[in-house]
Image (cartoon, rainbow, N blue to C red):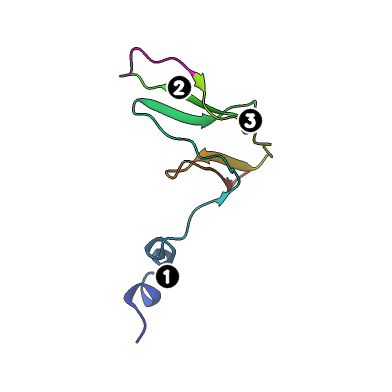
């Protein structure tokens, strides 16, 4: 017997089975600190910028691995601490 979401909601199947949005491209694991927003800068390194409620923090480079960026891709730091990339829909 097919599962409910296979028949009535096939778009939810990927979400329920845990399929990731992007592919992992980084090999360096970065540990996160509370109060910082993590992003991949124009230079290709991972940076941490303090959030508004973090008054004492300063912007700092976190990782040593340089990521070569391509146009049409979004780069982000995943919850597990590795860098991922995902294809942009309208790029």
* 1 vs 2, front mark: 2
Q: Are marks 1 and 2 in contact (CB under 8 Å)?
A: no
- Residue lying at 65% horizontally and 25% vertically, measured from the top left: 43
| Outermost residue, top side | 56
Q: What residue appears at the point 44 percent right and 35 percent down from the top-left corner?
A: 31
Magenta residues, dominant SS class: loop
| C-alpha span from label 1 to label 2 | 38 Å
Q: Hey, which quadrant is residue 41 in on the image?
A: top right
- The quadrant the N terminus occupies is bottom left
Q: CA distance from mark 3 to mark 1?
A: 37 Å
Q: Secondary structure at mark 2?
A: strand
Of the two numbered discs 3 and 1 in the rendering, the one whose residue sits closer to the viewer: 3
The image position of residue 5, as x and y in percent, is 35, 72
Q: Which residue is mark 2?
A: 49
Q: Quadrant of the C terminus?
A: top right
The residue that label 1 is drawn on is 10
Answer with left or right where residue 7 lies relative to residue 48. left
Asked if residue 60 is positioned above or below residue 69 in the image, the reply reads above
In front of the other: 35 or 86: 35
Query: Which span is picked out in magenta?
Result: 53-59
Q: Of helix, strand and loop, which one carries label 3?
A: loop
Residue 44 disc label: 3
Residue 83 location, x and y as percent? 54, 41
Is the residue marked by circle 2 packed among few (<14), some (14-19), or many (20+) residues within 10 Å?
A: some
Residue 16, by quadrant, is: bottom left
């Amino acid at each position: 017997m097919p599962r409910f979401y296979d028949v009535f909601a096939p778009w939810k199947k990927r979400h329920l089975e845990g399929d990731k949005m992007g592919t992992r491209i980084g090999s360096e694991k970065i540990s996160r600190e509370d109060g910082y927003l993590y992003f991949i800068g124009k230079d290709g390194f991972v940076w941490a910028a303090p959030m508004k409620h973090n008054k004492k923090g300063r912007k700092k480079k976190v990782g040593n691995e340089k990521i070569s960026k391509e146009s049409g891709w979004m780069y982000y730091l995943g919850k597990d601490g590795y860098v991922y990339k995902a294809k942009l829909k309208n790029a």
